[in-house]
Image (spheres, rainbow, N blue to C red):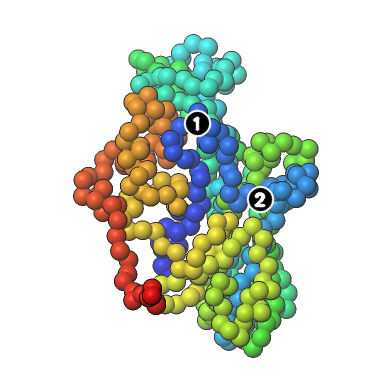
Amino acid sequence: MSQSLVDRIVGATLYEGYILYPYRPTSVKNQVRWTFGGVFPRAYAEQSGGTERSTVTTECLLRAGAGARVTVTARFLHPVTRTVLQLSEPVRTLTDADIARATAVASLDAGGRRHVSWEEATERSIDAGTYDVSLLLDAPRAVTVTFPAHTEREPVDGEDGMIAGVVERAWHELDLTVAISAEPRRESVRAIRVEVSNMTDAGGITRESALLHALVSAHVVLIARGATWLSLADPPDDQRDAAAACVNDGLWPVLISEDCVDDTVLASPIILEDHPQVAPESAGDLFDATEIDEILSLRILSLTDEEKDEMRAADARARELLERTEALTEQQFMRMHGTIRELRPASGHRP
């Protein structure tokens, strides 16, 4: 399996809903963030009465030969709070005392750019290991990972080489566990189960603060060697009961194959069909994989200059999206206008 193919598909789903048209933080739809694949601290999940999860689970069927092995990777977004601090007066050399006296502001215009306070995200990937399937049948495995809290600061340049403010990015600690197990099914088929649990100690919190301690858009990728994954959507006839018994909570596994070898499964919070692909006509991510690129691109070009300025200031991904769209050629637009993937004979006819 090509890692680049997996990365393209995971990238499209990982950032689904990250920021939506009109790509401005002030739009209502972009003030409700992180709506896909949230894995919250257990205390908050219990407090929510079951509307939020602290664990997501995927269970997949594997037709395993001798020496079959499975590699498990968990991927998600870690929310980052971006706070813009305005200094009481511009300085040439920034000190901790200057930062201590600074004021948090919604936005700051300096050096020909607008800087706004908002929430970003940083990608996380956990290599949970490679396991011999026969050993997993004897004993489950678990990997515990901690991402420590961290804060970083970036000076905001103003006029004449002076520093006008600071962009502060901070994320909270995350403690999580990835558990892997296997159970025998009919003949050589095995059920491989992966659970990703948020073990962060962050009780007595609101949803807004719980999101800062959450895994957002959690995905699991499973790669098999010496074995083949079976589709849960269209399993072989002799495995339909086994497929129906698989437990998938918060994740839905689909086959990702290359050269007709089903050695990779993507378990995503977004329900996909087997063998998904990113359209080759797409010039890049629009953060909504179900939308039509041409329509969204035309809408972006129709934004006012003020709206585009706000979009640029939202974050680096929104700015890149705007610049890429404004640079599209007529030929690239025509490629997005429509295509026929395949032609098949009609099944039946009308009287």
Along the polypeptide, which appears first: circle 1 or circle 2?
1
Compute the Cα span from label 1 to label 2: 25 Å
Q: Amino acid at mark 1?
A: Ser
Q: State the residue position of label 1.
A: 27
Q: Quadrant of the N terminus?
A: bottom left
Camera-side residue of 160 and 115: 115
Residue at the extreme top of the image, as rendered: 89
Q: Is residue 4 left or right of residue 172?
A: left
- Mark 2 burial class by Cα count in 10 Å: few <14, some 14-19, many 20+: many
Q: How many marks?
A: 2
Q: Is residue 97 left or right of residue 8?
A: right
Q: Amino acid at mark 2?
A: Val
Task: Look at the picture and state if 4 lies above or below 155.
Answer: below
Residue 21 % position (x, y): 44, 38
Which labelled disc corresponds to residue 227? Answer: none
Q: Quadrant of the C terminus?
A: bottom left
Residue at the extreme bottom of the image, as rendered: 187
The image quarter containing residue 209 is top right
Measuring 24% from the left and 51% from the top, which residue is drawn there?
Answer: 334
Q: State the residue position of label 2.
A: 39
Camera-side residue of 288 and 141: 288
Camera-side residue of 337 and 211: 337
Task: Look at the picture and state if 334 lies above or below 154.
Answer: below
Q: Is residue 209 visible?
A: yes
